[in-house]
Image: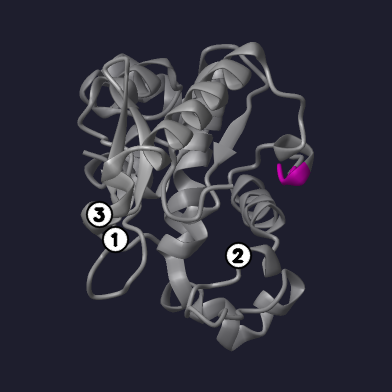
């Protein structure tokens, strides 16, 4: 879940101590391709195996599919492969209907091919988290937070300010703050502007520190590079040529 932003996926990944979490905000300054997403995951699998771990969990925000877009899926569309995973359909607001495409199975099948090319045997399981997660019982924090927001909404509606503008209630520094609609709605589209994950902030920095994924140190340190290449059944030079681009694109 999370078409426009990766907050939910990132939070789930941090709370569950996932091996890797990928969100669309990583790719806002450049186009992302399906194989690039798969190569980041593949690099994570190889690194985990080098560390002696034969298991892991990857959390993918569904917004990655939106980031890839029709252009990124064009080769699959032209070859007829996309039909195995659903259809590219847009809603009345011109958004891709992400639920129509089995993104997890698509990634799993492509990863299986890439792993076989390296001679690595890995069992992959995909799972779409949807309404069973949304329908989970609220935790005490949820109850407290929504009670505060509800109180703030009624307090605002009973104030003189509510006759001047509509607002969304937000909790800022311990105070319930009404944010006028005009501050958060894009005047050109008439839709609310999504609040993106700040990939330069410490919350994202914390998440990245705990992920197991290829980074620059793996290519700068000859011993690390040799170990990774050996796990992948490649020479160090071949490994660098094959995977170094995912580091450059994530910095």
The label on residue 185 is 1
Residue 128 is covered by the magenta coloring: yes
Above or below: residue 183 compared with residue 13? below
Residue at horizontal 76%, vertical 25%? Answer: 137
Residue at the image point whose x is 47% and y is 54% from the top: 64
- Tag 2 and tag 1, C-beta contact below 8 Å: no
- Residue in the picture at 58% in, 34% down: 58
Residue range (magenta): 127-131
| In this rendering, the label closer to the viewer, 2 or 3 | 3
Q: Nearer the viewer, residue 101 or 54?
A: 101
Point out the tag, 2 or 3, that comes first from the N-terminus: 2
- Residue 207 to residue 191: above or below: above
Q: How far apart, in angstroms, are the residues tagged by discs 2 and 3? A: 38 Å
Determine the secondary structure under disc 3. loop
**Closer to the camera in the image, 188 or 145:** 145
Give whichever of discs 1 and 3 has the lower sequence position.
Answer: 3
Residue at the spot of label 2: 98
């Amino acid at each position: 879940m999370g078409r426009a932003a990766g907050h939910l996926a990132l939070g789930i990944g941090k709370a569950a101590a996932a091996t890797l979490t990928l969100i669309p905000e990583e790719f806002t300054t450049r186009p992302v391709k399906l194989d690039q997403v798969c190569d980041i995951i593949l690099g994570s699998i190889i690194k985990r195996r080098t560390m002696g771990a034969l298991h892991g969990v990857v959390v993918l925000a569904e917004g990655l599919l939106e980031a890839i877009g029709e252009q990124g899926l064009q080769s699959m569309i032209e070859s007829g492969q996309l039909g195995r995973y659903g259809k590219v359909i847009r809603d009345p607001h011109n958004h891709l209907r992400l639920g129509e495409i089995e993104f997890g199975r698509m990634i799993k099948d492509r990863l299986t091919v890439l792993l076989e090319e390296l001679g690595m045997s890995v069992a992959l399981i995909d799972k779409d988290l949807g309404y069973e997660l949304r329908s989970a019982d609220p935790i005490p924090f949820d109850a407290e937070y929504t009670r505060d927001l509800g109180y703030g909404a009624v307090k605002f509606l009973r104030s003189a300010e509510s006759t001047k503008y509509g607002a969304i209630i937000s909790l800022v520094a311990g105070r319930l703050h009404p944010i006028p609609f005009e501050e958060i709605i894009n005047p050109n589209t008439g839709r609310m502007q999504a609040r993106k994950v700040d990939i330069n902030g410490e919350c994202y920095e914390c998440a990245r520190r705990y992920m197991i994924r290829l980074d620059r140190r793996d290519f700068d340190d000859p011993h690390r590079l040799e170990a990774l290449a050996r796990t992948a059944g490649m020479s160090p030079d071949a490994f660098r040529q094959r995977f170094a681009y995912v580091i450059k694109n994530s910095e």
